Image (cartoon, helix red, strand yellow):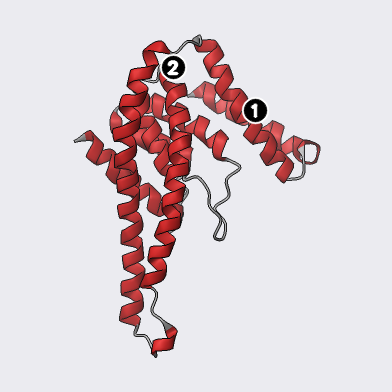
Amino acid sequence: MEIVLVSLLGGLLALDATSVGQFMTSRPLVAGALTGWAVGEPAAGVAVGAILELYLLVSYPTGGSRFPEGSTATVVAVAAAGTGSPGALALAVAAGLVWGQLAGASITYLRRANARLVPDPGQGPTSTRRLAAGHLGAVLLDFVRGVVVTFAGVLVVRPLVGGLVASWPVPPGATFGLLLVGGSVSVGILLRDFGGFRRHRTAFVVGLALALLGARLL
């Protein structure tokens, strides 16, 4: 039953990314918290979501570009992380990043399917009912895609992480350090895209301080 709930959540979060709303609930941090609540592991959900948020900050879903899908990847990673032990956390994040690439590829096929739902202007005038039906059909396809991608991801990733976590060789402190180093690379790339650290150092330092304060209060 849990996998059904998680899959439906993945479908809803996939919609938020582009098709409906764009309320930012599809961002890894929010998606992780929601999934953690759904599976009864809110702390692990927030931890996985925060780490994946760092890794995916450099992904901009603009135009027709192909990008990893962070929402379904986060749902899959949180569902696989279990109680959030360091080894499970690292393996779940790694698997989530890989699954995000596969989910991103599914968006390419979705766009091709959506193109077939668009009425051909060469065939004459199109009714508003047909346009509305095409739009709703595209939204439904995106929801189904999100559900299927999430369901398949949980089926594949959860037993994989569960089987490998016992042999995770890195100590807890080093594991968290490894994850943060990888996230720092993404933050560095993001700062460079925004003009470099010197140009925005005040905003960066203030934001980092507030984030650390918020994490401590939580």
Q: Residue 14 or 95: which is nearer the viewer? A: 95
> Where is mark 2, residue-wise?
87
Which of disc 1 and disc 2 is earlier in sequence? Answer: 2
155 vs 194: above or below: above
**Can you name the residue that lies furthest to the bottom here?**
124
Q: Is residue 212 left or right of residue 204?
A: left
Tell me the SS state at disc 2: helix
* Classed neighbour count for the residue bearing mark 2: other residues with Cα under 10 Å, few (<14), some (14–19), many (≥20): many
Q: Which mark is residue 209?
A: 1
SS class, disc 1: helix
Q: Amino acid at mark 1?
A: Ala
- Please give the name of the residue rendered at 57% of the width and 45% of the height, measured from the top-left corner: 59
Q: Residue at x 53, y 48 (%)?
A: 67
Give x and y (percent) for residue 216: 53, 21
Mark number, residue 92: none
The reply to whether residue 132 is in sight is yes
* Residue 211 relative to residue 28: left or right: right
Residue 143 image offset from top left, x and y in percent? 32, 54
Q: Position of residue 62 (x, y in %)?
A: 57, 56
Residue at figure coordinates x 65%, y 35% from the top left: 187
Q: Amino acid at mark 2?
A: Gly
